[in-house]
Amino acid sequence: MDTSIYTAYADYEWAIKLNRICLKMLGIWPKNNETKWEKLMTNVRVIVMLNIGFWFCTIPSVYSLLRIWGNIMSMIDNLQYTLPFTMATIKFFIMWQKKKDILPLLNMIKHDWLKPKTMQERNVMIKRARLACILTIFGYFIMLISFLLCTILPIFGFSMRYLTNKTDPGRLVPIQTYYFYDRDKSPLYEITYVLQTIGMSIFAAVYTGTDCFLSVLVFHVCGQLENLKARVIELDKFNNFENVLSYSVQDHIRLIRSINIIDNIFALMLLGALFYFGILFAFYGFLFGTVITQHRNISAPRLTFIVTTFVNTFAHTCFYCVVGEMLVAQCRKVYEAACQLKWYTLKPKKARNLLIVMICANKPLYLTAGKLFPMTMATLFVKDIGQLYIGLAGTSGIKNSDNV
């Protein structure tokens, strides 16, 4: 095997390895030339995992929320689980249904890594892929800490949650749920505990794995846009100007289509995530305002879990907006590179052909939340500050009957 081809394939494997392991385990990693039997077994695995998470985590936590409606502290405790479970269910289902749309993106990534490229272009791709890997490792690490705190400590009688006789009348379980059977009797308690743990692990992997996969896609496109910008800047130095310009235009159109596909896949997820983060941030503002203004006590284990959940939630919120902002910035740089090119030194025909790149790059490309508004840093600050203010303002009407 040619050394350069081997190196390129090794780079490609390194860039997608972590995400492929997680999504393949969940059954939502698309494959080329998948047989009918493989497709059937993958779909069966997805259906089983969806049902475990849905019937033993999502539905019982939603029903528990209805039972404790009106008790603000119990509701905040419940929503820390119910909202992520609901979002993970949506993400899981969308990724499963969009496998055919995801496959061309993966083929594009593989082609970009394996095709001949300069060392400068490879370095750009390595830099972007390394950033995506760091975010992936960080995301899994934070989620693993939250998962272990929720599932291991209740075995020894410690809980990270807000406990009341209404929500936890018997033996401890990882999450606030209500079942139609007596879960405290053995072996129903042990079975419920194990299935809750399995469901939480599935949803944790889906929740984090989907966002990490989004980072791989967006950072790869950003790297290709950066390489395109460098090529456009040097256009006037190429002897075969028309061929290089034609290739650049085709490459730019390909990347625009890729961004549109990514947006179509993740738009609904991002919209749901914004609603989820907005609600949770408002309640956290209420909770922290209560603790500060009314000097209420809060246990150290529960404070640890709240802080971990808050960091995880805020990190994912920042992540959505940061990758969207990076995408917008890279698209803008391609346009600026075309405008800064010394077009006035070119022949009229060459300068006129350069307009194609300018026209394509002039329109900003965004990741959107439900096709309604762009995911940028401006969206992050406006939403988060507004929701936090709402939560803090709500503390003025608290009743003194509840304990944190």
Image: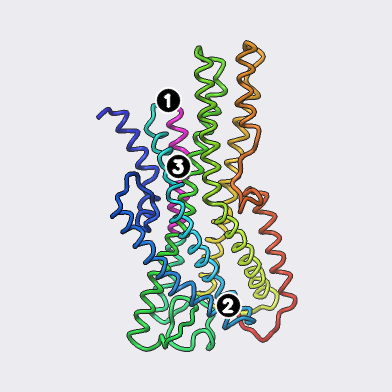
Residue 144, placed above or below residue 240: below
Mark 2, secondary structure of its residue:
loop
> What x and y, as percent, mark residue 90?
50, 61
- Of the two numbered discs 3 and 1 on the same chain, state the one appearing first in sequence: 3
Mark 1, secondary structure of its residue:
loop
Going by the numbered disc 2, the residue's amino acid type is: Ile
Is residue 70 a member of the stretch shown in magenta?
no
Q: Nearer the viewer, mark 3 or mark 1?
A: 3
Q: Nearer the viewer, residue 19 or 349?
A: 349
Residue denoted by label 2: 298
**Horizontal side, residue 4 vs residue 222: left or right:** left
The disc at residue 118 is: 1
Q: Could you say which quadrant of the image residue 154 lies in?
A: bottom left
Q: Nearer the viewer, residue 94 or 311?
A: 94
The disc at residue 259 is: none
Q: Quote the CA–CA distance across marks 3 and 1.
A: 22 Å
Q: Nearer the viewer, mark 1 or mark 2?
A: 1
| Residue bounds of the magenta highlight | 117-142
Mark 3, secondary structure of its residue:
helix
**Horizontal side, residue 253 vs residue 391: left or right:** left
Asked if the residue at tag 2 contacts the one at tag 1, i.e. Cβ–Cβ closer than 8 Å, the answer is: no
Q: Residue at x 54, y 26 (%)?
A: 249
Q: Could you say which quadrant of the image residue 11 lies in?
A: top left
Q: Quote the CA–CA distance across marks 3 and 2.
A: 47 Å
> What x and y, as percent, mark residue 350?
60, 15
Going by the numbered disc 3, the residue's amino acid type is: Leu
Going by the numbered disc 1, the residue's amino acid type is: Thr
> What x and y, as percent, mark residue 363?
65, 35
Residue 156, placed above or below residue 88: below
Residue denoted by label 3: 105
